[in-house]
Image: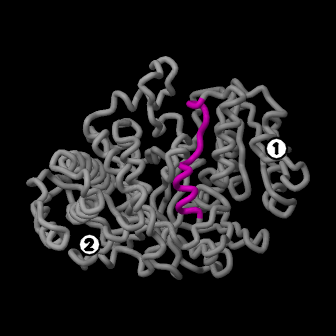
Amino acid sequence: MDAPTTTSADNGTSGGGGGGWFTPRNQPPTTPDNEREAAEGSRLAAMRPMGRTTTDTDRDRPAEDAAQAAPPAQPTPRPEPAATPAAVQPHAAERIAPEALRADPRLPSQRSISPATPPQQQPRAQVQAESASPDALLIRRTMAEVAPIADKVTSYFYALLFVRHPDLRSLFPAAMDTQRDRLLKALLTAAEHIDNTEVLVAYLQNLGRGHRKYGTRAEHYPAVGECLIGALSKYASGIWDAEMEAAWIRAYTTISQVMIDAAAADELRAPAWWYAEVVAHDLRTPDVAVVTVRPDQPYPFLAGQYTSLETPWWPRIWRHYSFASAARSDGLLTFHVKAVPAGWVSNALVHRARPGDIIRLGPPAGSMTVDHTSDSGLLCLGGGTGIAPIKALVEDVAEHGERRTVEVFYGARTDLDLYDIDTMLRLQQSHPWLSVRAIIDQQAHLQLPDAIREYGPWHEFDAYLSGPPGMIRSGVNALRNIGIPSERIRHDSVEELVAIGD
């Protein structure tokens, strides 16, 4: 499925940029604006990360994912076991607008707090905001200042990066219009969740591992951080001071170390990327294809996860797709791809890819996996090609020989969009603990999240959602409203859904 969403069009605008990682430096100069840029050019020259440089020679780095390296964290984590890729956290936090930052119950939302509201009546996020660290408050203040001019900040960041460090230009896609807004979205997450150490460390570990496929090395981080600080200080000049700059420096120094350490550890046990040959291409509808590939070496992953994928037709443009099955004995991997308007990668995979073509895969990621230590039932909502990871979860339960109740709601706009319903019904016939219900919007005039209210109760179920961003948002709300605790609702990042639903 489109990674990990289904129908959200990227429209050629998603993508990345970097994050900054460096050691503290002197106070910012007080030169006029026309002299400030020149002064900024040398003031971060001494920044050096402490981590070991990876040796991967692949220098293809799409900017769409590079910008994800924004959320800061505090401690340096221990590497995860190689066979169990770490979750992409906050892969359930939408990072586009404050009102959308509620997708992951583990992450706080950005809301103003009225002094008249007693703590016991305030939302959890508001109580946390009152106890935010000084650095978090300074960073959030910066982001509030630059949010209305996010496009200018992003453009200026890339201008600084490519002028001061032209050697880094080759790491990014040729068409920079594919990534203009990703950096500021990532920064909004950092501003909002800087103190959420547990979640952000796991997120940064995954980013460090994932950035290996772009050719990112430890020495690149200071340059990106230098230009990020340059852009922020320019457009937040009205409030920018030495204290605020030091807060950003501390945060991004920590970010870089977490990512570099994770990349170095991962280099010892896994390649930066895998080649994979297309072995089957099944066009299910005019714009949905089931694509099966054979990696050139073993590819470990968990059902419910996803990967990044690059085609030969669009070098350095990576998009995320969920695995449509549990791990197979033959090592093959299957993806459900929906071609979306202006979707470079999705259209190439649906309309151009054929058996024999070679693509590249990044490492697996995602936390929407089954907890096999629990006997709770599974309530699964899959919209459109979002049925792909749901199917993988069903297969995973079956392979573990469990008899847990699994209820699948397969949502689609029309009958034609139920392109994989026959497969799901065959699974239902083979497993008495599985129930599959198709919800067709145009026939029932009922959205998928609303349909689950007619069934249940669901209090003893773990919920899994996969599909378009709108379905994820409404689905999470619907599940909470019927009494499923937030910690038992799993899905991948709505920000990822919006930004890389190509």
Per the model, the C-alpha gap separating discs 2 and 1 is 53 Å
- For the residue carrying disc 1, how many other residues have a C-alpha within 10 Å: few (<14), some (14-19), or many (20+)? some
Q: Quadrant of the N terminus?
A: bottom right
Decide which of tag 2 and tag 1 comes sooner along the chain. Answer: 2
Where's residue 329, x and y in %?
Answer: 61, 55
The verdict on residue 202 being magenta is no
- Residue name at image x 53 percent, y 61 percent: 499
Task: Residue 334: tell me if it is visible.
Answer: no
Q: Nearer the viewer, mark 2 or mark 1?
A: 2
306 horizontally vs 53: left or right: right
Q: Quadrant of the C terminus?
A: bottom right
Q: What segment is highlighted magenta in the picture?
A: 486-501
Q: Position of residue 254 (x, y in %)?
A: 24, 46
Residue where numbered disc 2 is placed: 160
In the picture of the structure, the residue carrying the numbered disc 1 is 436
Tell me the kind of residue under disc 1.
Answer: Val
Q: Above or below — where is 486 with respect to 294?
A: above
**Of 289 and 93, which appears nearest the observer?**
93
Give SS at disc 1.
strand
Name which residue lies at 31% across and 50% down: 142
Q: Is residue 283 left or right of residue 357?
A: right
Q: Quarter of the image holding residue 130?
A: top left
Identified by mark 2, the residue type is Leu
Q: Is residue 340 above or below residue 51?
A: below
